[in-house]
């Protein structure tokens, strides 16, 4: 690994500079294979191991350089294309993702198909060399700035629900696609609804094989839960989003670093609000430090936080040793969402009536209130707590699967049965 670090460091010293545009810097990283070092050579990578990729990330961090592009396409789309795509699809999309020229979104969840994604009803019907798509997706992050989407759609309603699904890379900029932002209770609009009306996707943008998209979707979700982008070296300053629509590609990286530092400062303050240490300081400020119930809840959080830290270290050690993530992926996510809820409830209880304030009038600028409004998303995104418990029970503890009487029935029959019962 010393050779990898030395080569990366020499390259960064010769190529990094704050006067480059983001497009130029990300382009250089991708062409040299340092953007996503574990991706194949010629596609933005070097074919390195995950441990070697992390060494490259440390070099970028030490140099204060901007990190490679980060987005759903880079975290999940690229690894999925490497695993399931054709050579033509790899040529078409991987280098564009590695160089940050494209931004992708994930077109999975639907109003009636969230945790049970296999119940999706968005349809794709083949018409010659294209597929015609009709339906709706929801909770789609980044849909307004995405160039493409990872779309799962039903292509054979006569097959069981897991077997009649196909996976597409879908072009977002076309007639028949409507994106509607969803306003959140914290004032933001991170998520969107996406509606398809006779939208078109070419047949050569099917990933895997027709009606066998479920396994590709499962791979995508695995990369999402790992959150490691299939080998991207963690490191460097996060600055700017990929794709033309995010408006950062032609800005100087030095300017973007300053913007990123401000954003990271805000995010750090939000994350710190969930820590047991920050809550202990809050209890001291409000004179609740000696309350026995508050002290007990703070200690419970401290114990869970330390367990979570050790669990994360175990996962990182497994990745460095070349092993696939195990149960720590699901248990870690479950602990994280639990800690978030505990921090929300405890911080607002400590503040008492002040917890009803928001903005600059609230204690510490309202960061605990903002955290309280946002934290519940952690129990949903990337698989709900209930789904994580199912995974742990079935795949780790070896418990029997939940009964699924609809697993082998044709999907068309399931929908007919639902419509009959609704009309009665």
Image: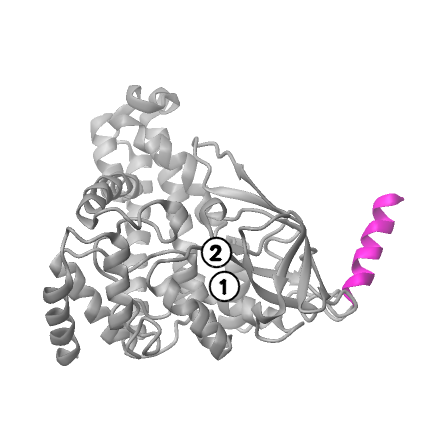
Residue at 57% in and 60% down: 151
Residue at 69% in and 59% down: 132
Specify whether 238 is left or right of 177. left
Q: Is residue 423 magenta?
A: yes
Q: Position of residue 222 (x, y in %)?
A: 47, 67
Q: Position of residue 262 (x, y in %)?
A: 22, 39
**Residue contact between numbered discs 1 and 2, judged by CB atoms under 8 Å:** yes
Q: Position of residue 55 (x, y in %)?
A: 19, 71
- Stretch of the chain drawn in magenta: 410-424
Any part of residue 233 in sight: no
**Mark 1, secondary structure of its residue:** helix
Q: Position of residue 400 (x, y in %)?
A: 62, 71
Disc ID at residue 342: none
Q: Is residue 310 magenta?
A: no
Question: How busy is the neighbourhood of tag 2: few (under 14 within 10 Å), some, or many (20 plus)?
Answer: some
The answer to whether 223 is drawn above or below residue 173 in the figure is below
Residue at 71% in and 69% down: 128
Q: As rendered, which of 329 and 213 lies closer to the eye? A: 213
Q: As rendered, which of 61 and 387 lies closer to the eye? A: 61
Residue at 75% in and 65% down: 406
Q: CA distance from mark 1 to mark 2?
A: 7 Å
Q: Quadrant of residue 46 in the image?
A: bottom left
Reading the image, the residue beneath label 1 is 221
Reading the image, the residue beneath label 2 is 382
Question: How busy is the neighbourhood of tag 1: few (under 14 within 10 Å), some, or many (20 plus)?
Answer: some
**Mark 2, secondary structure of its residue:** loop
Q: Could you tell which of marks 1 and 2 lies nearer the N-terminus?
A: 1
Instruction: Give the prevailing secondary structure in the magenta stretch.
Output: helix
Q: As rendered, which of 407 and 181 lies closer to the eye? A: 181
């Amino acid at each position: 690994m010393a050779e990898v670090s030395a080569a990366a460091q020499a390259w960064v010293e010769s190529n990094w500079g704050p006067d480059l545009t983001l497009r130029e810097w990300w382009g250089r990283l991708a062409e040299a294979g340092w953007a996503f070092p574990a991706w194949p050579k010629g596609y933005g990578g070097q074919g390195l191991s995950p441990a070697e990729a992390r060494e490259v990330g440390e070099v970028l961090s030490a140099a204060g350089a901007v990190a490679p592009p980060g987005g759903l396409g880079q975290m999940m789309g690229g690894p999925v294309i490497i695993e399931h795509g054709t050579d033509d699809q790899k040529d078409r999309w991987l280098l564009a993702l590695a160089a940050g020229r494209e931004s992708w979104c994930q077109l999975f969840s639907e109003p009636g198909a969230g945790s049970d994604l296999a119940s999706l009803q968005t349809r794709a019907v083949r018409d010659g060399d294209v597929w015609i798509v009709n339906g709706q997706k929801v909770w789609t992050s980044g849909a307004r700035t995405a160039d493409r989407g990872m779309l799962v759609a039903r292509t054979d309603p006569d097959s069981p629900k897991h077997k009649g699904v196909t996976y597409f890379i879908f072009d977002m900029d076309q007639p028949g696609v409507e994106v509607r932002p969803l306003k959140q209770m914290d004032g933001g609009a991170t998520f969107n609804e996406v509606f398809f009306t006779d939208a078109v996707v070419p047949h050569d943008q099917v990933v895997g094989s027709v009606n066998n998209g479920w396994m590709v979707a499962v791979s995508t979700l695995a990369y999402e839960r790992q959150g490691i982008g299939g080998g991207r070296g963690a490191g460097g300053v996060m600055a700017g989003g990929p794709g033309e629509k995010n408006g950062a590609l032609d800005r100087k990286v030095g300017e973007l670093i300053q913007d990123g530092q401000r954003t990271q400062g805000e995010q750090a303050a939000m994350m710190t609000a969930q820590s047991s240490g920050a809550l202990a300081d809050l209890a001291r400020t409000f004179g609740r430090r000696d309350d026995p119930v508050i002290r007990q809840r703070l200690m419970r959080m401290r114990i869970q936080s330390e367990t979570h830290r050790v669990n994360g270290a175990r996962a990182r050690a497994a990745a460095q040793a070349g092993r696939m993530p195990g149960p720590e992926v699901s248990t870690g996510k479950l602990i994280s969402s639990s800690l978030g809820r505990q921090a929300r409830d405890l911080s607002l209880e400590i503040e008492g009536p002040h917890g009803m304030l928001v903005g600059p009038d609230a204690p510490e600028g309202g960061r605990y209130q903002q955290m309280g409004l946002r934290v519940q998303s952690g129990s949903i995104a990337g698989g709900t707590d209930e789904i994580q418990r199912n995974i742990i029970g079935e795949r780790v503890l070896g418990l029997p699967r939940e009964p699924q009487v609809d697993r082998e029935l044709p999907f068309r029959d399931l929908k007919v049965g639902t419509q009959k019962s609704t009309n009665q």
